[in-house]
Amino acid sequence: MFGGKGGVGKTTCSAAQAIKFALKGKTTLLFSTDPAHSLADSFEANLSQGINPFPQIPNLFLYEINAEEVFGKFREEYHVEIKDLLTTCSYLDQDDLDDLLHLSIPGLDELMGLKTVTDFMDSHEFDVYVWDTAPTGHTLRLLTLPGIIDEWIITVARMKWKYFDMMRGFKRRDVFDPQEDILLKMKKLIKKVSSLLKNPGSSHFTIVMIPEKMVIEESRRMAAQLHSYGISVSRVIVNNVYPYNEDCDFCREKSRGQSGYLEEIVNDFRGKEIKIVPAQPREVKGIPLLSFFAKFL
Ligand SMILES: Nc1ncnc2c1ncn2[C@@H]1O[C@H](COP(=O)(O)OP(=O)(O)O)[C@@H](O)[C@H]1O
Ligand SMILES: [Mg+2]
Protein backbone atom coordinates (compact mmCIF):
# COMPACT_ATOMS: atom_id res chain seq x y z
CA MET A 1 0.00 0.00 0.00
CA PHE A 2 1.27 3.43 -0.89
CA GLY A 3 -0.37 6.27 1.01
CA GLY A 4 0.12 9.94 1.70
CA LYS A 5 -1.01 13.45 0.90
CA GLY A 6 -2.24 14.29 -2.61
CA GLY A 7 0.47 15.04 -5.17
CA VAL A 8 3.47 13.68 -3.23
CA GLY A 9 4.18 10.83 -5.66
CA LYS A 10 2.03 7.88 -4.55
CA THR A 11 1.09 6.85 -8.07
CA THR A 12 4.65 7.28 -9.35
CA CYS A 13 6.09 5.20 -6.48
CA SER A 14 3.45 2.45 -6.82
CA ALA A 15 3.99 2.29 -10.57
CA ALA A 16 7.77 2.08 -10.18
CA GLN A 17 7.45 -0.54 -7.43
CA ALA A 18 5.07 -2.63 -9.53
CA ILE A 19 7.49 -2.53 -12.48
CA LYS A 20 10.25 -3.67 -10.14
CA PHE A 21 8.23 -6.68 -8.93
CA ALA A 22 7.14 -7.60 -12.46
CA LEU A 23 10.72 -7.48 -13.79
CA LYS A 24 11.71 -9.86 -10.99
CA GLY A 25 9.24 -12.34 -12.49
CA LYS A 26 6.36 -11.89 -10.05
CA THR A 27 2.88 -11.62 -11.51
CA THR A 28 1.92 -8.21 -10.23
CA LEU A 29 -1.42 -6.44 -10.05
CA LEU A 30 -1.09 -2.70 -9.66
CA PHE A 31 -4.46 -1.24 -8.70
CA SER A 32 -5.70 2.17 -7.72
CA THR A 33 -8.67 3.23 -5.62
CA ASP A 34 -8.01 6.94 -6.03
CA PRO A 35 -11.07 8.44 -7.74
CA ALA A 36 -8.62 10.74 -9.56
CA HIS A 37 -7.25 7.86 -11.60
CA SER A 38 -3.76 8.33 -12.88
CA LEU A 39 -2.29 4.92 -13.67
CA ALA A 40 -3.07 5.42 -17.35
CA ASP A 41 -1.40 8.81 -17.20
CA SER A 42 1.64 7.50 -15.35
CA PHE A 43 2.16 4.61 -17.81
CA GLU A 44 1.16 6.77 -20.78
CA ALA A 45 -1.24 4.02 -21.79
CA ASN A 46 -4.91 3.69 -22.58
CA LEU A 47 -6.58 1.51 -19.99
CA SER A 48 -9.93 -0.15 -20.40
CA GLN A 49 -12.25 -1.20 -17.59
CA GLY A 50 -11.16 -4.17 -15.52
CA ILE A 51 -7.71 -5.73 -15.50
CA ASN A 52 -5.33 -4.65 -18.28
CA PRO A 53 -2.26 -6.70 -19.15
CA PHE A 54 0.61 -4.35 -19.91
CA PRO A 55 2.23 -5.72 -23.08
CA GLN A 56 5.62 -3.99 -22.70
CA ILE A 57 6.24 -5.63 -19.32
CA PRO A 58 5.26 -9.26 -18.97
CA ASN A 59 3.75 -10.12 -15.55
CA LEU A 60 2.40 -6.61 -15.04
CA PHE A 61 -1.33 -5.94 -14.87
CA LEU A 62 -3.03 -2.60 -14.27
CA TYR A 63 -6.44 -2.01 -12.79
CA GLU A 64 -8.12 1.30 -12.04
CA ILE A 65 -10.96 0.34 -9.76
CA ASN A 66 -14.07 2.37 -10.24
CA ALA A 67 -15.32 2.06 -6.68
CA GLU A 68 -18.61 3.80 -7.43
CA GLU A 69 -19.35 1.27 -10.12
CA VAL A 70 -18.44 -1.72 -7.96
CA PHE A 71 -20.58 -0.34 -5.16
CA GLY A 72 -23.42 0.23 -7.63
CA LYS A 73 -23.29 -3.46 -8.57
CA PHE A 74 -23.33 -4.46 -4.92
CA ARG A 75 -26.30 -2.19 -4.29
CA GLU A 76 -28.14 -3.69 -7.23
CA GLU A 77 -27.44 -7.22 -6.09
CA TYR A 78 -28.59 -6.61 -2.52
CA HIS A 79 -31.15 -3.88 -3.06
CA VAL A 80 -34.11 -5.99 -1.86
CA GLU A 81 -32.34 -7.34 1.21
CA ILE A 82 -31.03 -3.93 2.28
CA LYS A 83 -34.47 -2.43 1.85
CA ASP A 84 -36.13 -5.24 3.82
CA LEU A 85 -33.58 -4.86 6.52
CA LEU A 86 -34.17 -1.15 6.83
CA THR A 87 -37.97 -1.46 6.74
CA THR A 88 -37.88 -4.02 9.53
CA CYS A 89 -35.79 -1.82 11.72
CA SER A 90 -37.01 1.67 11.05
CA TYR A 91 -40.00 3.81 10.29
CA LEU A 92 -38.65 5.03 6.97
CA ASP A 93 -41.10 5.03 4.07
CA GLN A 94 -40.25 3.72 0.59
CA ASP A 95 -39.11 7.07 -0.81
CA ASP A 96 -36.82 7.76 2.13
CA LEU A 97 -35.38 4.29 1.75
CA ASP A 98 -34.63 4.82 -1.94
CA ASP A 99 -32.88 8.08 -1.09
CA LEU A 100 -30.89 6.40 1.63
CA LEU A 101 -29.78 3.60 -0.67
CA HIS A 102 -28.44 6.09 -3.17
CA LEU A 103 -26.44 8.07 -0.68
CA SER A 104 -22.79 7.40 -1.04
CA ILE A 105 -21.52 6.14 2.27
CA PRO A 106 -17.93 7.38 2.73
CA GLY A 107 -15.54 4.49 2.54
CA LEU A 108 -18.10 1.89 1.54
CA ASP A 109 -17.48 2.27 -2.18
CA GLU A 110 -13.76 1.74 -1.66
CA LEU A 111 -14.41 -1.23 0.55
CA MET A 112 -16.40 -2.72 -2.31
CA GLY A 113 -13.45 -1.92 -4.56
CA LEU A 114 -11.19 -3.83 -2.22
CA LYS A 115 -13.62 -6.72 -2.32
CA THR A 116 -12.85 -7.11 -6.00
CA VAL A 117 -9.17 -7.40 -5.17
CA THR A 118 -9.60 -9.77 -2.21
CA ASP A 119 -11.57 -12.02 -4.55
CA PHE A 120 -8.48 -12.20 -6.78
CA MET A 121 -6.38 -12.94 -3.74
CA ASP A 122 -8.64 -15.87 -2.93
CA SER A 123 -8.07 -17.33 -6.35
CA HIS A 124 -4.28 -16.69 -6.05
CA GLU A 125 -4.15 -15.07 -9.44
CA PHE A 126 -1.24 -12.77 -8.68
CA ASP A 127 1.94 -13.01 -6.62
CA VAL A 128 1.97 -9.38 -5.52
CA TYR A 129 -0.63 -6.63 -5.22
CA VAL A 130 0.48 -3.01 -5.28
CA TRP A 131 -2.20 -0.62 -4.05
CA ASP A 132 -2.05 3.02 -5.07
CA THR A 133 -4.39 4.47 -2.42
CA ALA A 134 -6.44 7.64 -2.45
CA PRO A 135 -5.11 10.67 -0.54
CA THR A 136 -4.86 10.37 3.26
CA GLY A 137 -8.38 11.34 4.37
CA HIS A 138 -10.06 8.89 2.00
CA THR A 139 -7.84 6.00 3.00
CA LEU A 140 -8.19 6.64 6.72
CA ARG A 141 -11.97 6.76 6.35
CA LEU A 142 -11.87 3.43 4.62
CA LEU A 143 -9.91 1.99 7.52
CA THR A 144 -12.36 3.29 10.16
CA LEU A 145 -15.20 1.62 8.31
CA PRO A 146 -14.85 -1.83 9.93
CA GLY A 147 -15.48 -0.26 13.36
CA ILE A 148 -18.46 1.76 12.14
CA ILE A 149 -20.04 -1.19 10.36
CA ASP A 150 -19.51 -3.39 13.40
CA GLU A 151 -21.46 -0.93 15.53
CA TRP A 152 -24.07 -0.66 12.84
CA ILE A 153 -24.49 -4.45 12.70
CA ILE A 154 -24.85 -4.66 16.49
CA THR A 155 -27.52 -1.93 16.46
CA VAL A 156 -29.43 -3.54 13.60
CA ALA A 157 -29.25 -6.94 15.24
CA ARG A 158 -30.60 -5.50 18.49
CA MET A 159 -33.49 -3.83 16.66
CA LYS A 160 -34.27 -7.04 14.86
CA TRP A 161 -34.38 -9.04 18.09
CA LYS A 162 -36.79 -6.53 19.55
CA TYR A 163 -38.89 -6.76 16.43
CA PHE A 164 -38.94 -10.55 16.45
CA ASP A 165 -39.80 -10.61 20.17
CA MET A 166 -42.75 -8.42 19.42
CA MET A 167 -43.83 -10.46 16.42
CA ARG A 168 -43.25 -13.87 17.98
CA GLY A 169 -46.93 -14.41 18.60
CA PHE A 170 -47.90 -13.66 15.00
CA LYS A 171 -45.16 -14.82 12.71
CA ARG A 172 -42.99 -17.89 12.39
CA ARG A 173 -39.37 -17.01 11.89
CA ASP A 174 -38.01 -18.32 8.58
CA VAL A 175 -35.06 -20.64 8.68
CA PHE A 176 -33.19 -18.67 6.01
CA ASP A 177 -33.15 -14.97 6.60
CA PRO A 178 -31.77 -12.99 3.64
CA GLN A 179 -31.32 -9.92 5.83
CA GLU A 180 -28.95 -11.80 8.06
CA ASP A 181 -27.22 -13.19 5.02
CA ILE A 182 -26.19 -9.75 3.85
CA LEU A 183 -25.08 -8.65 7.32
CA LEU A 184 -22.98 -11.78 7.64
CA LYS A 185 -21.46 -11.33 4.20
CA MET A 186 -20.58 -7.73 4.95
CA LYS A 187 -19.09 -8.66 8.29
CA LYS A 188 -17.01 -11.44 6.72
CA LEU A 189 -15.73 -9.13 3.99
CA ILE A 190 -14.71 -6.47 6.50
CA LYS A 191 -12.98 -9.01 8.69
CA LYS A 192 -11.12 -10.39 5.72
CA VAL A 193 -9.99 -7.02 4.40
CA SER A 194 -8.94 -5.66 7.78
CA SER A 195 -7.06 -8.77 8.88
CA LEU A 196 -5.27 -8.79 5.55
CA LEU A 197 -4.20 -5.18 5.93
CA LYS A 198 -3.14 -5.68 9.54
CA ASN A 199 -0.99 -8.72 8.87
CA PRO A 200 2.63 -7.51 8.79
CA GLY A 201 3.59 -10.81 7.17
CA SER A 202 1.52 -10.10 4.10
CA SER A 203 0.98 -6.35 3.90
CA HIS A 204 3.34 -3.40 3.97
CA PHE A 205 2.35 0.23 4.19
CA THR A 206 4.64 2.84 2.66
CA ILE A 207 4.02 6.51 3.38
CA VAL A 208 5.16 8.73 0.53
CA MET A 209 6.04 12.30 1.45
CA ILE A 210 8.03 15.30 0.32
CA PRO A 211 10.19 17.40 2.66
CA GLU A 212 7.66 20.15 3.38
CA LYS A 213 6.14 21.21 6.68
CA MET A 214 2.49 20.48 5.99
CA VAL A 215 3.21 17.19 4.29
CA ILE A 216 5.33 15.98 7.21
CA GLU A 217 2.62 16.96 9.69
CA GLU A 218 -0.04 15.10 7.74
CA SER A 219 2.21 12.05 7.34
CA ARG A 220 2.91 11.99 11.06
CA ARG A 221 -0.84 12.05 11.83
CA MET A 222 -1.42 9.37 9.23
CA ALA A 223 1.21 7.07 10.75
CA ALA A 224 -0.34 7.53 14.21
CA GLN A 225 -3.83 6.79 12.96
CA LEU A 226 -2.70 3.76 10.97
CA HIS A 227 -0.98 2.52 14.11
CA SER A 228 -4.22 2.90 16.08
CA TYR A 229 -5.98 0.69 13.50
CA GLY A 230 -3.29 -1.94 13.90
CA ILE A 231 -1.47 -1.17 10.65
CA SER A 232 2.18 -0.36 10.96
CA VAL A 233 4.14 1.69 8.49
CA SER A 234 7.19 -0.21 7.33
CA ARG A 235 8.74 2.30 4.96
CA VAL A 236 8.88 6.00 4.28
CA ILE A 237 9.71 7.40 0.86
CA VAL A 238 10.92 10.99 0.87
CA ASN A 239 10.33 12.12 -2.67
CA ASN A 240 11.43 15.18 -4.60
CA VAL A 241 14.64 15.79 -2.65
CA TYR A 242 16.91 18.42 -4.24
CA PRO A 243 20.59 17.62 -4.66
CA TYR A 244 23.02 20.09 -3.13
CA ASN A 245 24.87 22.00 -5.81
CA GLU A 246 27.19 24.86 -4.91
CA ASP A 247 27.11 26.25 -8.45
CA CYS A 248 23.35 26.56 -8.71
CA ASP A 249 21.68 29.19 -6.52
CA PHE A 250 18.26 27.65 -6.86
CA CYS A 251 19.38 24.08 -6.03
CA ARG A 252 21.50 25.27 -3.13
CA GLU A 253 18.65 27.23 -1.54
CA LYS A 254 16.15 24.47 -2.18
CA SER A 255 18.48 21.88 -0.70
CA ARG A 256 19.21 24.01 2.38
CA GLY A 257 15.49 24.50 2.93
CA GLN A 258 14.84 20.76 2.72
CA SER A 259 17.70 19.58 4.92
CA GLY A 260 15.99 20.60 8.21
CA TYR A 261 12.85 18.73 7.18
CA LEU A 262 14.88 15.67 6.21
CA GLU A 263 16.35 15.61 9.71
CA GLU A 264 12.86 15.92 11.16
CA ILE A 265 11.65 12.98 9.07
CA VAL A 266 14.60 10.81 10.07
CA ASN A 267 13.84 11.60 13.74
CA ASP A 268 10.09 11.09 13.48
CA PHE A 269 10.25 7.85 11.55
CA ARG A 270 13.18 6.28 13.35
CA GLY A 271 13.14 2.52 12.97
CA LYS A 272 11.40 2.55 9.60
CA GLU A 273 13.14 2.03 6.31
CA ILE A 274 13.68 5.49 4.80
CA LYS A 275 14.27 5.94 1.08
CA ILE A 276 15.32 9.25 -0.42
CA VAL A 277 14.25 9.93 -3.99
CA PRO A 278 15.80 12.90 -5.80
CA ALA A 279 13.74 15.46 -7.67
CA GLN A 280 13.80 14.61 -11.37
CA PRO A 281 14.19 17.18 -14.10
CA ARG A 282 10.99 15.98 -15.78
CA GLU A 283 7.63 14.49 -14.84
CA VAL A 284 8.11 10.79 -14.17
CA LYS A 285 5.93 9.15 -16.80
CA GLY A 286 6.32 6.20 -19.13
CA ILE A 287 8.35 3.01 -18.70
CA PRO A 288 11.92 4.35 -19.13
CA LEU A 289 11.52 7.12 -16.53
CA LEU A 290 9.51 4.93 -14.12
CA SER A 291 12.14 2.17 -14.36
CA PHE A 292 14.89 4.67 -13.61
CA PHE A 293 12.84 6.03 -10.67
CA ALA A 294 12.42 2.45 -9.35
CA LYS A 295 16.17 2.27 -8.61
CA PHE A 296 15.68 4.67 -5.70
CA LEU A 297 13.02 2.55 -3.97
N1 LIG B 1 10.89 12.78 -7.86
C1 LIG B 1 10.12 13.42 -8.75
N2 LIG B 1 10.66 14.37 -9.56
C2 LIG B 1 9.90 15.03 -10.46
N3 LIG B 1 8.60 14.82 -10.65
C3 LIG B 1 8.00 13.89 -9.87
C4 LIG B 1 8.71 13.15 -8.89
N4 LIG B 1 7.84 12.31 -8.28
C5 LIG B 1 6.64 12.52 -8.85
N5 LIG B 1 6.72 13.45 -9.81
C6 LIG B 1 5.63 14.00 -10.65
O1 LIG B 1 4.74 14.69 -9.76
C7 LIG B 1 3.40 14.54 -10.18
C8 LIG B 1 2.56 13.97 -9.04
O2 LIG B 1 2.97 12.65 -8.76
P1 LIG B 1 1.90 11.48 -8.49
O3 LIG B 1 2.68 10.22 -8.37
O4 LIG B 1 0.81 11.52 -9.48
O5 LIG B 1 1.37 11.94 -7.05
P2 LIG B 1 0.11 11.36 -6.20
O6 LIG B 1 -0.25 10.04 -6.78
O7 LIG B 1 0.62 11.27 -4.80
O8 LIG B 1 -0.98 12.37 -6.33
C9 LIG B 1 3.43 13.65 -11.40
O9 LIG B 1 3.37 14.44 -12.54
C10 LIG B 1 4.79 12.95 -11.32
O10 LIG B 1 5.30 12.63 -12.61
MG1 LIG C 1 -2.15 9.37 -7.51
Image: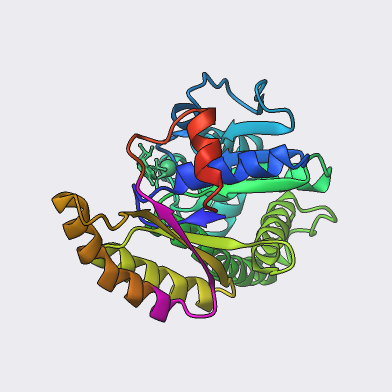
Furthest residue to the front?
247
Q: Residue 153's image quarter?
A: bottom right
| Residue 199 in sight in this render | yes
The quadrant in which the N terminus is found is bottom right
User: In which of the image's four quarters is ligand 2 placed?
Assistant: top left
Q: 176 or 285: which is nearer to us?
A: 285
| Residue 109 in sight in this render | no
Furthest residue to the left?
249
Q: Is residue 269 above or below residue 286?
A: below
Q: Residue 262's image quarter?
A: bottom left
Q: How is the image coloured?
A: rainbow
Q: Residue 104's image quarter?
A: top left
Residue 147, percent across and down?
55, 70
Residue 281, percent across and down?
32, 38
- In the image, residue 202 lies in the stretch drawn in magenta: no
Residue at the image position 58 percent from the left and 36 percent from the top = 70
Residue at the image position 70 percent from the left and 68 percent from the top = 199
Horizontal side of residue 106 vs 158, given as left or right: left
Q: 287 or 278: which is nearer to us?
A: 278
Horizontal side of residue 273 vs 200, given as left or right: left
Q: Is residue 156 above or below residue 16?
A: below
Residues rendered magenta in the picture: 266-279
